[in-house]
Amino acid sequence: STANLLGHLYKVVAYYFLYLAIYADAVSQPYRQMHYMLTHDDLTGLPNRAAFNEKLNLAVVRARQDAPCAVLLLDLDHFQNVNDTLGHEHGDLLLVAVAGRIQASLPKTAFLARFSGDEFVILLENMAIDPAKQVGQDVLQAMEREFDIENDHLGISASLGIVAYPTDGDSASVLMRYADLALHRAKSSGRNCLIVFSRDLSAEIQRRVLLEARLKHALQREEFALHYQPKLEIRTGHLVGWEALLRWNSPELGAVSPEEFIPIAEQSGLILPIGDWVLREACRQMRVWQDLGLVAGSMAVNLSTRQFRQTDLAEEISAAIRDAGLVPGDLELEITESSIMDNQASAASVLAGLDHLGMRIAVDDFGTGYSSLSYLKTFSIHCLKIDRSFIRDIPGDENDTAIVRTIIALARSLGLIVVAEGVETEAQLAYLRANHCDQIQGYLFSRPLPPDACAALMRDRAGLAVA
């Protein structure tokens, strides 16, 4: 009958749609799982870089002049120390806890993603720069509380770079590049702070790009030179050594300050070939002076953070010394406190290798880095160089005189040589002599000199000694 036919037809249609629903769910569920895996971080469950980039591109399209958006790029300060001292498991647990705390401190409309490693990024839609800064301050404030990770109480700070659309850039890629620059400025400003992108930073980018492009060819074009600043022993007045200082004279840019180009070389990785050239050239020059019969003392060479991270550093230095015909005692290596403390496990290995070679290690710019002094007895250190910022105002500044006096006493108690950098006046020298500082370096005695002028200085002082 017609009714039975319609009933059967209804069942066929119902089973067909039921089959489609079951099939669609069976197919779509793995797809949804795969999409989630591709767009989320396994550890924290947060959206990942790909998801954030997609979200930011959409936000840029939607944003208008009266409805801007802001991006906050966050990086944990010295996170590597957690992995090195407590292990990667603790590090992972800390990252999960940090993600949760950041999320809890944000407005509900904020979009938080984990970019990579210890780097997180926040998108704030329909928010101008001033309220975005307040969000950033809230995040930094939330980070001030310690994290309970198993049986440990861990404290860690963060640095933030902030950028706004459309004020600072017209595309997602430009915004992220500027956010990264603002973050780097926050790091270099002492960390645990936020920096808002400005046009001054934009001009800095253009200058940086130009310098990096020219740096790539400077070594090949022989645009680098070394000048050498002498070190004087206070007690005897004898010249006891030299510090090799890099100079760059570009045909296009003129003389470029080391304070400007060395950080760029460091961040771009160009410091590795440049640093190797400095090491070998300093060793070569020391050998030339020795062959001339000059009493040059030792040669100090600065090692960058990137150089210090090289696992084969000891072998490279050993080869440079051997090729120049020197002995390890002819060379002293200067490293900063931050180079040691940024990765203590790696530092321990590298310093042990250098100590095995018989190398002398000096801590440069001492007093400007870490408050912890435990590394002085943990690692093989031979010399402390007091940063010039503490020397500048002695003996008139009570705080600086107290700091200098304390550093000298610390060095003497540990059996370390102490060198004062940036000595420019007789009053500074008199104070340092009265407090038993070992050596000085600075314009009072000599500015950095080209090799020929160094040789002349050594001949003159040898003549004075004979007389």
Image (spheres, rainbow, N blue to C red):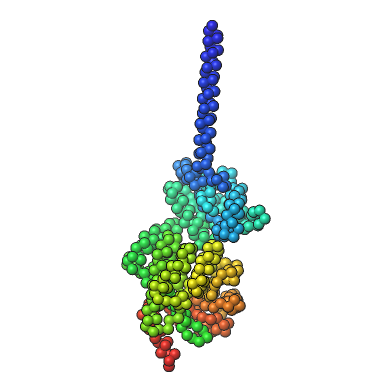
Q: Nearer the viewer, residue 398 or 28?
A: 28
The answer to whether 309 is drawn above or below residue 387 in the figure is above
Measuring 47% from the left and 54% from the top, which residue is drawn there?
A: 180
Where residue 54 appears, as percent x and y from the top left, is 47, 43
In which image quadrant can residue 416 be found? bottom right
* Extreme residue toward the right, this view: 151
Q: Is residue 228 left or right of residue 47?
A: left
Measuring 55% from the left and 9% from the top, which residue is drawn there?
A: 4
Where residue 321 appears, as percent x and y from the top left, is 42, 73
* Extreme residue toward the bottom, this view: 467
Q: Is residue 451 left or right of residue 349?
A: left
The answer to whether 449 is drawn above or below residue 43 in the figure is below
Measuring 57% from the left and 57% from the top, which residue is drawn there?
A: 83
Where residue 116 appears, as percent x and y from the top left, is 51, 51
* Extreme residue toward the top, this view: 1
Q: Nearer the viewer, residue 13 or 89?
A: 89
Measuring 50% from the left and 43% from the top, which residue is drawn there?
A: 51
Where residue 132 appears, as percent x and y from the top left, is 54, 50
Which quadrant is home to the N terminus? top right
Q: Is residue 389 something that shows in the picture?
A: no
